[in-house]
Image: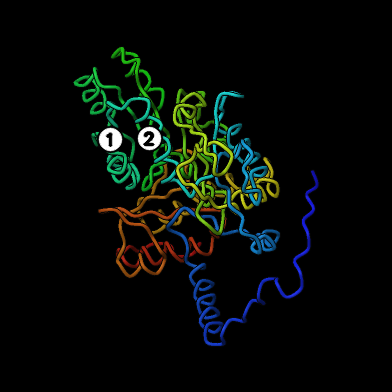
Amino acid sequence: MSDAYPAVPAGLGPEPMPHLPPEAAVRLQGFLTRMEELSGSFIGYPCSQDYDYPEIAPFLRFSMNNVGDPFGESFFRENSFEFEREVVGFFQRRLRAPEGETWGYVTAGGTEGNLYGLYLARELYPDGMVYYSEHTHYSAAKIVRVLGARSIMIRGRDDGEIDYDDLYETLQMRRDVPPIILANIGTTMHGAVDSLPLIRAMLKDLAITRHYIHADAALSGMILPFVKDPQQFGFDAGIDSIAVSGHKFIGSPMPCGVAVAQQRHVDRVARSVEYVGCRDTTIAGSRNALAPLVLWSAINRWGEDGLGERVRRSIAMADYAIERFAAYGIRAWRHRNSVTVVFPRPSAEVIGRWQIAPSRDIAHIITMPHVTRGMVSAAVADVAASLGAEGNATP
């Protein structure tokens, strides 16, 4: 069967694309200028901004759509499934997934990845109870409401990890209910990693055999694979599913991520859809087909060594930030293998100027690959001034 199609007769083709009105073009240019100015103070949120993907621009001319299972063949042929499969394979290897035992897809971000993991868990254990820390990403409370799942919030320690004593006592009181545990592999505010070995030891000690562990590794999921001594974070640590963001450490102009789960759990929810000619295994129907191209391009551009170097530079920059805070007599700290630097909450004006994320009496900056020593020095100086701290202002 030939892939050739007859030419469209003259006069029946699409109308020429009209030009953007001058006033609209001016508005867009103004918006671009504003984004360029803001990029110099983007230090408080975990999104890399050291990228450029000119090779992706030509694909904006097509109505690409990754509808359906990327490991199948869809009737909708304008998709990037082949690139999505390679991206998923890269994440599977980095997340220590046993070959042939997991499945994954490119999501719209960490929240969809967490939704997917908890969706699989609820389908496996409809009577299960979701446990998550008070330091878990704010989307967790929304996800359990969407799923109609029962849940209990566990206390969190001051350093951001889950309170293991509170978790143990709560599990012990409900040993007859299958626990669905949302473990943090890098909390939003503190960069803390919940101990998967401790959680698994609790389940074993309480003789709880029916359980599900989902890992939210939005940021740290692409950091821990490249450090020498990582905390346990992947499938070799006994997790059932994991969500990692693509627009965070790797960097993307659109929010995206990857969800990976045990194949046996995915098979429980898969349905065949005649309309598109492949299985329906994802949360969204229509999915962004450009995101896999972006991630594929980044992975191939940086390579293993390049990504590892980005991690090392970012951690070194976090240590530099801690040194600068110390020069002003301000205590700042980070967790091992984390690029999240925590310090006392500054004024609202400084928070707005540097796009700093606050929570109660603390705030943080995150030294993503685009963050420079100049940005760190200037931000720390402003924080110190707002806190009335004095010290050595010279880097």
User: Which residue is rendered at x = 39% and y = 28% of the image?
Assistant: 213
Instruction: Check residue 118 in the rendering and tell me which mark sits there, or answer none.
Output: 2
Residue 67 in picture, x, y percent from top left: 55, 46
SS of the residue under disc 2: helix
Q: Amino acid at mark 2?
A: Leu
User: Which residue is rendered at x = 42% and y = 65% of the image?
Assistant: 354
Q: Amino acid at mark 1?
A: Ala
Which image quarter is the N terminus in? top right
Q: Quadrant of residue 330?
A: bottom left
Vertical comparison of 57 with 264: above or below:
below
User: Which residue is rendered at x = 39% and y = 46% of the image?
Assistant: 333
Q: 321 or 189, which lies in front?
A: 189
Q: Quadrant of residue 223?
A: top right
Instruction: Check residue 88 in the rendering and tell me which mark sits there, or answer none.
Output: none
Instruction: Check residue 149 in the rendering and tell me which mark sits there, or answer none.
Output: 1
Q: 31 or 112, which lies in front?
A: 112
